[in-house]
Image (cartoon, rainbow, N blue to C red):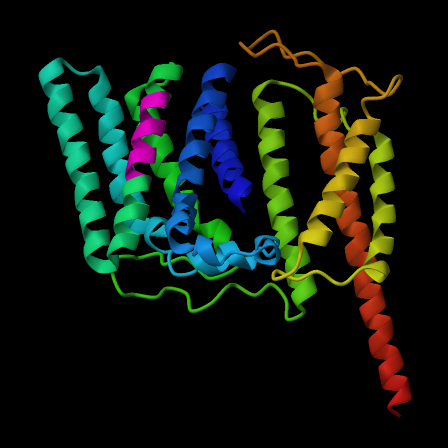
Amino acid sequence: MFVGHALLAFALAALLADRLGWPAERALALGAVAGAFAALPDVDMAYAAIAIDFGSLTAESLTRPSTLWDATREVHRAVTHSLVVSVLAGGAFGLWAVAWDRRPAVRAAGSLLAVGVLAAIVGVGSAQNGTLGLVVLGTFAVGGLVVTTLGRLRTDLSGRAVAAAAVLGLCSHPWGDLVTGEPPRLLYPFDVRVLDGRVLLHGDPTVHLLGAFALELAVVWLAAVAVATVTGRSWRDAIDPRAAAGLAYGVAAVLMVPPTLEVSYHFVFSILAVGVVCGGASLTTGSARPIPRPSASRRRLSAAAPSAFGGTFSALAGITAALVGYAAVYLADEALSAVLVGLFSI
């Protein structure tokens, strides 16, 4: 969900800004800043640089994803995925952003207060988790200040807008992790467990994986539709009908090992390849389709090249068709197997 976190916050912020009548450029800028903050909690993966015993690594261990995940199991989705930390840190980042426009004395005081709040958060993390808390929350605090500063320097967003993006992005992050692994510690540093385990979408691990992938894909769709909406373009007209060929991916359900959350790379990479093929097909000569220009009644960005726009949505449509095809064949195969087992057991 690394990308999904950022795209969800981007879509929510951009669509909200568009709903409020913001110009397209500012709406997309707000979405980008919110997306950057939404990705920030995953800096806890940086702890792997300390936790991994590089001296014991072998060529075989470098090919196993568990090498990274096992090294960060103690910290990932813990200290930086807390709603308590998100609200306090988001407020501190917001204060840093708002103080930017004030006179020098007020700006200095606001900046010092923001740094003080962040230092207190890092101090609590260090007291509770030692080096782990110090490294992870320290990186988190510095990263947030960098994102905040870039948000003020590189966009025309106000301090309040950047502050809102910070809180929205940080608080939206934990919810995307509920179905993909160890649940986040939502109330850290308090020793209160809101969830004891991941939210189970289905008892069959493969169906659960397909559901989790569908949620991730839905978030990508939401972000893409948000861009189309904000820029005033029709995404439905941009999809190449040939993307329906992705349904043929369903045959993979009987040809490869069923994927699970623990082993899913063969499924993810192959289904994404279907999207690349479908998106690429829409870029071929003669496949470009006219896309309506933005409405003249609103200030909008000029439309991007139809081929690139259509290629993106055709790729998403191809992946969606592939997922539907795979799920249909897998479920049919499982149902048939259950029927046959029942018949032979009589």
Q: Count the numbered circles shown.
A: 0
Chief secondary structure of the magenta portion: helix
Q: Is residue 294 visible?
A: yes
The residue depicted at 62 percent of the width and 57 percent of the height is 60
Locate residue 275: give its quadrant.
Answer: top right
Q: Is residue 179 visible?
A: no
Of all residues, the one furthest to the top in this rendering is: 296
Q: Nearer the viewer, residue 287 or 76?
A: 76
Q: What span is in magenta?
A: 140-150
Q: Position of residue 207 (x, y in %)?
A: 69, 63
Whether residue 190 sits left or right of residue 265 in the image: it is: left
Q: Position of residue 24 (x, y in %)?
A: 51, 16
Q: Nearer the viewer, residue 203 or 300?
A: 203
Of all residues, the one furthest to the front in this rendering is: 55
Locate residue 26: give its quadrant.
Answer: top left
Q: Nearer the viewer, residue 269 or 168?
A: 269
Q: Is the residue 177 above or below the residue 274 in the image?
A: below
Locate residue 195: give its quadrant.
Answer: bottom left
The residue depicted at 72 percent of the width and 53 percent of the height is 266
The residue depicted at 42 percent of the width and 28 percent of the height is 33
Q: Is the residue 57 above or below the residue 94 in the image?
A: below
Image quarter hosting the C terminus: bottom right
Q: Is the residue 193 above or below the residue 346 in the image?
A: above
Whether residue 101 sits left or right of residue 43 in the image: it is: left
Residue 218 highlighted magenta (yes or no)? no
Q: Position of residue 221 (x, y in %)?
A: 64, 37
Q: Position of residue 22 (x, y in %)?
A: 45, 18
Q: Is the residue 326 above or below the residue 23 in the image?
A: below
